[in-house]
C-alpha cells in the first residue's frame, strides 16, 4: 500500500483514478498557463495527442510532464556539432512540464525529465529518434543546461523569449547507463 507522503511517478493511465477534474483543478505551479494546461492533459492523453507522466502524492497531483513525437528542421542545428542530420530531425518533444508550488525544489522536475528520457529510449528502439527537444522559458534555461540540454535557437511567443533546447539520444543513453551503474 502506498504511503500518503510518498511521491510516486507513472503514466497518466496508471493514475487515472486519482487524476480527476477536482484534483487537477487544485494543481498550482505558480503559472496560470501550466495550471490551465494541467486540466487538459487527461483529454489530450486519451486522444493520443500527447503522453503524460505524472507525480502523485496521495490524492494530489504534484507535477506532470507531457511528451509527443515531432520533427525539427535541420536548420535548427546550424553551427552545432551534432554530426550529419536529416532534413527533418526526428525528436521527442517535451510539450509541458510543471511542479506544484509546495513540491518545487524537491527533484520532481528532474525525475519527470528522467522518466521522459527513458520513454525516448523506448521510442528510439522502435523508430528513428535523434534526441529530445523542448522550448524553455527564460528562467528555466540554466536548469536544462545543467541536465545536458543545449540551446539551439530562440523565438518570441506571447512576448516571452523561448529557447529551443536539445539533448542527443546518445547523451541520454550515456547518462542513464551511468545512473544505473551507480544505483
Image (tube, grey):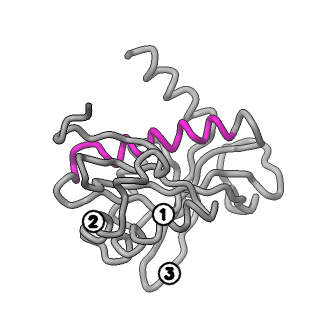
Q: Is residue 151 above or below residue 182?
A: below
Image quarter where the N terminus lies is top left
* Residue 100's disc number: none
Q: Quadrant of residue 82?
A: top right
* Precedes in sequence: disc 1 or disc 2: 2
Q: CA distance from mark 1 to mark 2?
A: 14 Å
Residue 164's x, y, as percent? 55, 62
* Residue 27's disc number: 2
| Mark 2 or 3, closer to the camera | 2
Residue lying at 25% horizontally and 52% vertically, measured from the top left = 59
Query: Which sits in the foreground, 172 or 115?
Result: 115
Q: Is residue 122 magenta?
A: yes
Provide the residue span drawn in magenta.
Answer: 104-123
Q: CA distance from mark 2 to mark 3?
A: 24 Å
Q: Which SS class for mark 2?
A: loop
Label 1: how many residues lie within 10 Å, few (<14), some (14-19) or many (20+)? many
Q: CA distance from mark 3 to mark 1?
A: 25 Å
Q: Are marks 1 and 2 in contact (CB under 8 Å)?
A: no
Query: Which sits in the foreground, 157 or 55?
Result: 55
Residue 79's x, y, as percent? 67, 54
What residue is shown with label 3?
Answer: 157
| Mark 1 or 2, closer to the camera | 1
Q: Is residue 115 magenta?
A: yes
Residue 167's x, y, as percent? 56, 45
Q: Which SS class for mark 1?
A: helix
* Residue 42's disc number: 1
Amino acid at each position: 500500500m502506498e504511503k500518503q507522503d510518498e511521491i510516486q511517478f507513472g503514466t497518466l493511465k496508471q493514475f487515472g483514478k486519482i487524476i480527476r477534474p477536482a484534483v487537477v483543478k487544485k494543481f498550482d505551479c505558480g503559472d496560470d498557463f501550466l495550471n490551465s494546461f494541467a486540466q487538459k492533459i487527461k483529454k489530450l492523453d486519451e486522444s493520443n495527442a500527447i503522453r503524460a507522466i505524472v507525480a502523485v502524492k496521495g490524492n494530489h497531483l504534484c507535477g506532470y510532464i507531457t511528451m509527443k513525437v515531432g520533427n525539427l528542421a535541420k536548420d535548427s542545428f546550424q553551427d552545432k556539432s551534432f554530426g550529419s542530420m536529416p532534413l527533418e530531425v526526428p525528436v521527442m518533444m517535451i510539450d509541458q512540464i510543471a511542479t506544484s508550488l509546495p513540491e518545487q525544489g524537491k527533484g520532481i522536475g528532474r525525475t519527470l525529465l528522467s522518466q521522459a528520457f527513458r520513454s525516448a529510449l523506448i521510442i528510439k528502439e522502435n523508430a528513428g529518434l535523434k534526441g529530445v527537444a523542448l522550448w524553455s522559458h527564460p528562467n528555466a534555461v540554466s536548469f536544462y543546461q545543467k541536465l545536458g540540454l543545449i540551446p539551439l535557437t530562440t523565438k518570441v511567443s506571447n512576448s516571452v523569449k523561448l529557447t529551443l533546447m536539445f539533448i542527443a539520444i546518445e547523451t541520454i543513453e550515456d547518462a542513464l547507463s551511468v545512473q544505473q551503474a551507480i544505483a
